[in-house]
Amino acid sequence: MIHKIIVGLLIICSFQHIVSQKKKEEQPNIIWLMAEDISLDLEVYGMQAVKTPNLNKMAKDGVLFTNCFVTNPICSPSRSAMLTGTHQVKINAHHHRSNREIPLDENFKPFTYWLREAGYTCILGNHGVMNKGRKIDANFKHEPIGPWDGKTKFGVFDKYDEFKKEDQPFFAQIQLQVTHRGDWWNEVREKSKHPVDPNKVVLPEYMADHSTIRLDWAKYLDQMEYMDNEVGMIFKELEEKGIADNTIVIFIGDNGRCNIRGKGYLHDPGLHIPLIVYAPKGLQGTKVREDVVSATDITATVLDFANIEVPKYMTGKPMFNKNFQREYVYGARDLWDEIEEKSRAITSGEWKYIRNDKPDVPYDAHQAYLEFYRPAVHVMRKLNKEGKLNEKQKFFFNPEKPAEELYHLSKDPMELTNLASNPLYADILNKMRKQTLEFDVQMKPVSKLYEPTIVKGNEVIKWVKANDPEVYKQMLDGVEIGYKKYTKAYKESIKE
């Protein structure tokens, strides 16, 4: 009798193991490719002069979103929102590189926590991309690898760099760093088999048509092509490992391009990002979606793909749910390095409203990071002093920001005409102003703790000016002299 019971129990356990294993195999793998600092500057979105064939194919076989927006135009607040699926202001992670030693409020968790609870292996980075793509950059206490309880353990992922069959089901988040401003841009261009011709790029109307700016834009597009090759490499690796048929791939930008009106600002080039979703078994709905999507919705969608119930605290919603609907994305800009800021915005895809609570802080605030990494700022600042910029180009260099901005995006996609003071649009202005105030209340921070990272970029600028005036002059002429190089030299001089 006992023998029969034991045999019966073994059969039940074996059956349960088979069912469990089958369920695991049915769960899709998910890869989240996050290119740094890019706007809609891909061939598939109509950007001229650049070639991105792998992303073209991904869009052709998947779903292309035309109205996806991040909730902050700077990397760490934006990533904090995506990592939790919750607006960065609500979780008190809205100040760039702040609160790094403060645990996330106990009511919130990284979304990888839920994936791991459901049996997913969570992987950070990839062995084949530039610098292995391991960036997390969240504004709460965290560690790359290890368990998470939010109190004494703060690990976000299980392992680095490689997905294998035995990891299934797995989630991999891979950063494509090459598009981020860096000292490698010149080298990437030099090694390109077909570098972008500066004479063929099409600049936005708010940028001056200058040879230095054209070359800088061409370099940016060269990084796009390099990044696109990395995307192709990831798909090839999936094929070679025999797991392509069960792997969903999501491609996005973490915030807008690092140029005038882009990264760091609530205008369209700062908030509007590419989003392409590919699933080997297909996705329901149209191939091109124009509905408004928040980057936090991507987080909720990952959980939905994994058949995990989306936690109620998340402000994101699954994009492929038949009931998905979003009228606005609420954007916020706060501290960025040494520049204290507070601006809020909402966008409906059709309209954009921006409220600048510190209008006395100009858009061109001479932030050290931008001094090193935005040649167009130096060139146009000089042209502005010489009276050679038109009204569209001068806007960025005005001594103050407008208290409010209103743009009709479908008619004015480059946000060149501020309608906030136009009485014909008073009703729309009032509606969007009221909606922004409502979001301010909804996303009220759970804490007022504020521990920013001290940034000494201005001291580095002063050191370069004093110790290498010729190089400093080159920087003012639009040459990227090397941020890391001179930061290192400055630190070594202090030690001496």
Image (spheres, rainbow, N blue to C red):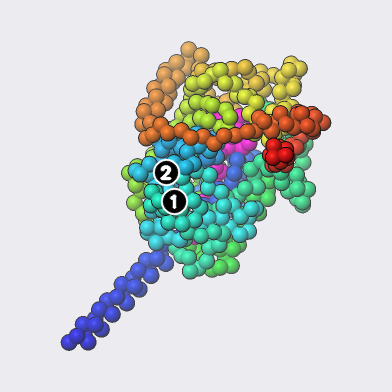
Above or below: residue 420 compared with residue 475? above
Q: Is residue 132 visible?
A: yes
Under mark 2, the amino acid is Pro
Query: Which residue is farthest right?
Result: 470
Numbered marks: total: 2
The question of residue 123 being in magenta is answered with no
Under mark 1, the amino acid is Phe
Disc 1: which residue: 154
Q: Is residue 349 visible?
A: no
Return the x and y of residue 369 as percentages of the image width and height: 64, 34
- Taking depth in this image into account, of 286 and 91 the one nearest to the observer is 91
Quarter of the figure with the C terminus = top right
Above or below: residue 236 compared with residue 93? below
Return the x and y of residue 476 as percentages of the image width and height: 76, 28
Sort mark 2 into few (<14), some (14-19) or many (20+) by Cα contacts within 10 Å. Answer: some
- Taking depth in this image into account, of 340 and 282 the one nearest to the observer is 340
Q: Residue at x 49, y 56 (%)?
A: 145
The question of residue 257 being in magenta is answered with yes
Q: Which residue is drawn at 36% across and 28% down?
A: 441
Return the x and y of residue 320 as percentages of the image width and height: 41, 48
**Residue 461: which disc?**
none
Disc 2: which residue: 103
- Taking depth in this image into account, of 463 and 45 the one nearest to the observer is 463
Q: Image quarter for residue 15?
A: bottom left
Query: Which sits earlier in the primary sequence, circle 1 or circle 2?
Result: 2
Magenta extent: 247-266
Return the x and y of residue 277 as percentages of the image width and height: 50, 50
**Residues at marks 1 and 2 touching, judged by CB atoms closer than 8 Å:** yes
Above or below: residue 323 compared with residue 344? below
Element marked by disc 2: loop
Element marked by disc 1: loop
Quarter of the figure with the N terminus = bottom left
